[in-house]
Amino acid sequence: MKNYPISVLSVTSLIFICVLVFTPVFAQDNKTDNNQDLVPIDIKLPKPMFIGTPQNMQVPNLEKPLGKLRPAFLAPKGTKNVALGKPVASTDEEPIIGEISMITDDDREASDGSFVELGPFTQYITIDLGSKHDIYAIVLWHFHKQPRVYFDIVVQVADDSDIITNVRTIFNNDYDNSSGQGVGSDMHYVETAEGKLIDAKGVQARYVRCYSNGNTNNDLNHYIEVEVYGKPAK
Ligand SMILES: [Ca+2]
Ligand SMILES: [Ca+2]
């Protein structure tokens, strides 16, 4: 063993202890986001149609169920669902079942009459929030009458309706890039009544685009509701 001077060792230990002691304090400061009060966002949940999650789904890279309700998601005070009633565009303008407008109509139930069915293969919907917003979370319900996994879930935000200007991808589980938006490393997940909450980390945008590419039951794409929790940008 080399004989390091004792002072070097002491300084090193001191730095290490300082990092341990002060890191949580700094982390907490970042989290308060310029001293805005953080409160749990109020997500209304629909009636669940099944309990638990099947263990036999043959899907690669599948997220394990949490086994309990999702913990509360904190966002600055005044954050609400800014997608409610906002216009939605779709690659399939004439859905097989339902209307595109049902994606932002505040109905999250699983029953027939509450979901819209889009055509097969890769489809996307684009929500126009009307102006720039600070976005903290996006919650997606594709279909929750039975457990299913939807493929190529990609969520992007941008400044324009064609999703060309200032595009940011906040979720992507298209591990083989079959929908052409790049390889994503997020995990597949089973649809439940809780929906899928994506942490958007305060990203600023006017438009939100959601991709999908069929599911474990069929090649079709479904939406029940998409919520965007945010505040108008200052
Ligand atoms: Ca709906
Ligand atoms: Ca894929």
Image (cartoon, rainbow, N blue to C red):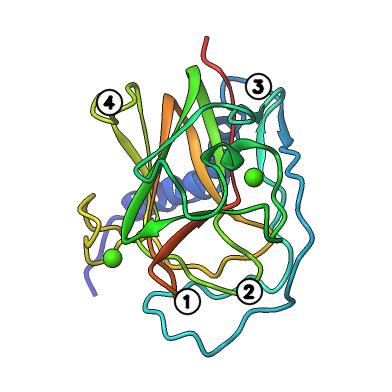
Name the one closer to the observer, 207 or 77. 207
Of all residues, the one furthest to the right in this rendering is 47
Marks 1/2 in contact by CB < 8 Å: the verdict is: yes
Q: Give me the C-alpha separation between circle 1 and circle 4.
A: 35 Å
Of all residues, the one furthest to the bottom in this rendering is 56
Q: Residues within 10 Å of mark 2 (few under 14, many from 20)?
A: some
Indicate the secondary structure of the residue bearing disc 3. Answer: loop
Q: Which label is found at residue 36? A: 3
Q: Quadrant of ligand 1?
A: top right
Marks 3/1 in contact by CB < 8 Å: the verdict is: no
Q: Is residue 165 placed above or below 101 in the rendered structure? A: above
x and y percentages locating residue 156 in the rendered image: 36, 40
Who's the residue at 58% across and 61% down the image? 143
Q: Depth-wise, is mark 2 or mark 4 nearer the camera?
A: 2
Decide which of tag 4 and tag 3 comes sooner along the chain. Answer: 3
Q: Residues within 10 Å of mark 4 (few under 14, many from 20)?
A: few
Indicate the secondary structure of the residue bearing disc 2. Answer: loop
Marks 1/4 in contact by CB < 8 Å: the verdict is: no
Q: Which label is found at residue 166? A: 4
Q: Residues within 10 Å of mark 1 (few under 14, many from 20)?
A: few
Decide which of tag 2 and tag 4 comes sooner along the chain. Answer: 2
Q: Which residue is mark 2?
A: 146
Who's the residue at 27% across and 26% down the image? 166
The quadrant of the rendering that contains the N terminus is bottom left
Q: Is residue 145 placed above or below 205 in the rendered structure? A: below
Indicate the secondary structure of the residue bearing disc 1. Answer: loop
Q: Amino acid at mark 4?
A: Asn
Q: Which residue is mark 1?
A: 217
